[in-house]
Amino acid sequence: MPNAPDEVISTVDRSALTPIVRQALDDATAEVIDWDYHTLQ
Amino acid sequence: MEERAAREDVTFEVEGRLAEAVAELLRSLESEWPTTGPERGVFRVAGHCRSGTEKVSWSVILKIRPERASRSEFYAYQSGILDDLRDDLQMPICYRIDEQENGSYWLWLEDAQDDIGVVWPVERFGLAARHLGHFNGQCLVGKPLLQAEWFGRKPTLQWDATERVLAQLESVRDHLLVARAYTPENARGVRRLWEDRHTLLAALETLPTTLCHLDAQR
């Protein structure tokens, strides 16, 4: 299991994000193209 | 022109000193009160996706909570107990909860944003306080008190942590940043409150129980 936040985030991949993004956009066919992140806390 | 340049130099120097002071203060507090670190953090994850023939932007919030953290937020979302909040106070939508093998959990949340921006005027804080007040007081005016085993109880009557925080606050009172907010007058007030805690807590015990958020901040 990764420890540092950067390591944690690096485990997130397209297959993990796709169902979440589809819910967020209310679009069951949306396909994730790219993503990035920044730390808020 | 020279005067302006001099003013800017002073500004940079002050900003630099403040930044150093913040970093120093955080370093001194981090070991006991970690705000970041292993298996915790809040992130905005954003990108693009293809929706039909269009390329659209998206963003979500990923909140990672360690095993040792309170699981109140986890249960609040999982149970749906707060789904019927009033329209003026809403929780961000939770898209998914991932429980990890090490006991930590990840909340994938709506990236809730307002139209005001980063700096709220005082009036907006007032409105938010009113909304929270409605929430905190609703069970006192007819609505049944929500009950759940995982609700915390405050005050907890376990004051070890508070005592440590107060001691730590005293130890950094002269720090550039702390001194700005924790003035001698404020320090006297905090000490007085601490000394009267048993009387105040006894009075609190006689009041009706209500459900409060207790962690509203901006």
Image (tube, coloured by chain):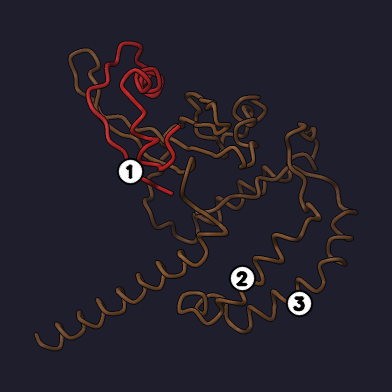
Chain colours: A red, B brown
* Left or right, residue B124 beside residue B21: right
Query: Residues at badges 2 and 1 in contact (C-beta under 8 Å)?
Result: no
Task: Locate residue A41, reporting x and y percent.
Answer: 43, 49
Residue at image mark 1 = A38
Chain label for disc 1:
A
Badge 3: how crowded within 10 Å, few (<14), some, or many (20+)? few
Task: Locate residue B207, reporting x and y percent.
Answer: 86, 52
Of tags 3 and 2, the one toward the viewer is: 2
Q: Secondary structure at mark 2?
A: helix
Chain label for disc 2:
B
Residue at image mark 2 = B168
Q: Nearer the viewer, residue B27 or B79?
A: B27
Of tags 2 and 1, the one toward the viewer is: 2
**Extreme left residue here?**
B1
Picture layout, residue B67 above or below residue B158:
above
Residue type highlighted by circle 3? Arg
Badge 2: how crowded within 10 Å, few (<14), some, or many (20+)? some
Residue at image mark 3 = B192
Structural distance between the alpha carbons of marks 3 and 1: 42 Å
The residue shown at (9%, 85%) is B1
Chain label for disc 3:
B
Of tags 3 and 1, the one toward the viewer is: 1
What quarter of the picture does the N terminus of chain A occupy? top left
